[in-house]
């Protein structure tokens, strides 16, 4: 496969806040329009061939199967040659054998696919649950305190379903639990983190967070915001480095609202405070947190879904100024847009990279793209 490379922002700008350079990024076309899978909705990053480097994973929503691109030449291998899949997926070690498996859903169910590194076979399909169609959001965490990775999903808003949890008893046995949220049924966006610092993972949807009580069997709603759009993309991180987890939200699809972060109160019963990065935005369909310029402060990545040729859809990083209540300055990497972009250190050079692709449209195929962060290379020069 011929890989095309373009360097973004070749002039390094020093941040006034920290004196460190704004990262240079190299845009790499992993798979061109002519050969990429149709509607590459699902994206994930993980080491799929056991060489210590992260690879890229794509699943198609329009019979393009599941494809992996192996670092460093981005050799394309088919995990499934055909088939259509839901919108979100993950790469993680489900069976605790030291290699990375895949969690993905389709109309036949929610499955995990066993990495053949240890068996020498093919990617074997294992059923998690019978309902894998129309999944919009998928996260994995230990939700019931048994040290096993569980899976939580949120279905597309039209189905008005609660968050559904799949608890792993063994890699072959899963229990379904959907007594979670009573409100926010019509919506999208899901994240998990320990928001109250009690040692278990909570859930965040819409304008509420669900407190994990009773080892994942009881969930109590707490409102942290009002009047947020139904369709969100959500992330959680300690942006102000005060020891409390904050919530970051952006409106997705055709709904409009603010790109904001909500700083956590010092006490569980306190008020969450909104900090607006950008007003009246829409179609944001990528959100993640990482330290992109290696200054010790978490930054925010956003990407806007590209729907039409005339649209200007930024793929951006918002750099923290590192203050106790940080402000953020935007660096635009591309105007091509991306859908469900993901963050990971692909080349193992110590800095986070960005993996993405648009969702596909009437224009035809889309490029599978990697924005490679060169900040650590710059520091070594």
Image: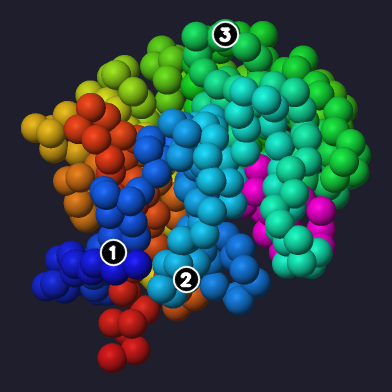
Q: Which mark is residue 160?
A: 3
Q: Earlier in the sequence, mark 3 or mark 2?
A: 2
> What is the C-alpha distance between the residues marked 3 and 2?
40 Å
- Residue at 76% x, 27% y is 129
Q: How many marks?
A: 3
One can see residue 89 in this view: yes
Q: Earlier in the sequence, mark 3 or mark 1?
A: 1
Kindly indicate the quadrant of the structure image that contains residue 319: bottom left
**Closer to the eye: label 3 or 1:** 1
Q: Is residue 220 above or below residue 90?
A: above
Q: Work out whether mark 2 precedes mark 1 in sequence or the reverse, and give the earlier one.
A: 1
Q: Which residues are magenta?
A: 91-103
Q: What residue is disc 1 on? A: 28
- The alpha-carbon separation of the residues under discs 3 and 1 comes to 38 Å
Q: Position of residue 178 (x, y in %)?
A: 75, 17
Q: Residue at image x 24%, y 35%?
A: 364
Residue placed most toward the observer, 361 or 35: 35
Q: Residue at x 28, y 40 (%)?
A: 365
> Which residue is tagged 2?
71
- Kindly state the secondary structure of the residue where label 3 is placed: loop
In this rendered view, identify the residue nearer to me: 201 or 244. 201
Determine whether the residue tagged by mark 1 lies in a helix, strand or loop: strand
How packed mark 1 is, by other alpha carbons closer than 10 Å (few <14, some 14-19, many 20 or more), is some
């Amino acid at each position: 496969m011929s890989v095309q490379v373009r360097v973004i922002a070749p002039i390094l700008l020093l941040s006034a806040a920290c004196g460190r350079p704004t990262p240079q990024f190299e845009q790499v076309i992993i798979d061109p329009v002519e050969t990429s899978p149709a509607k590459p909705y699902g994206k994930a990053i993980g080491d799929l061939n056991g060489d210590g480097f992260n690879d890229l994973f794509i699943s198609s929503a329009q019979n393009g199967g599941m494809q992996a691109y192996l670092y460093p030449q981005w050799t394309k291998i088919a995990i499934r040659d055909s088939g259509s899949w839901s919108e979100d997926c993950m790469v993680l070690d489900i069976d605790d054998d030291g290699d990375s498996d895949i969690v993905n859903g389709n109309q036949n169910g929610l499955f995990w696919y066993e990495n053949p590194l240890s068996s020498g076979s093919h990617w074997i399909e294992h059923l998690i649950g019978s309902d894998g169609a129309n999944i919009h959001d998928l996260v994995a965490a230990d939700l019931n305190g048994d040290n096993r990775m569980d899976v939580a999903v949120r279905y597309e808003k039209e189905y008005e379903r609660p968050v559904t949890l799949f608890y792993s008893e063994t890699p072959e046995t899963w229990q379904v639990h959907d007594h979670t949220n009573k409100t926010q049924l019509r919506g999208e966006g899901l994240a998990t983190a320990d928001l109250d610092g009690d040692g278990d993972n909570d859930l965040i949807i819409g304008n509420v967070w669900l407190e994990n009580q009773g080892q994942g069997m009881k969930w109590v709603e707490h409102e942290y915001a009002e009047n947020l759009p139904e369709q969100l993309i959500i992330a959680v991180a300690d942006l102000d480095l005060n020891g409390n987890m904050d919530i970051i939200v952006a409106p997705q699809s055709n709904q409009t609202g603010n790109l904001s972060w909500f700083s956590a109160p010092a006490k569980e019963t306190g008020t969450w405070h909104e900090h607006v990065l950008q007003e009246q935005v829409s179609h944001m369909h990528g959100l993640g947190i990482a330290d992109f310029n290696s200054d010790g402060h978490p930054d925010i990545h956003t990407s806007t879904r590209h729907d039409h040729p005339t649209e200007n859809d930024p793929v951006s990083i918002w750099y923290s100024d590192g203050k106790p209540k940080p402000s953020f300055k935007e660096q635009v990497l591309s105007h091509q847009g991306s859908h469900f972009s993901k963050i990971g250190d692909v080349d193992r050079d110590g800095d986070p990279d960005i993996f993405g692709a648009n969702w596909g449209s009437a224009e035809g195929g889309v490029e599978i793209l990697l924005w490679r962060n060169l900040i650590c290379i710059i520091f070594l020069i």
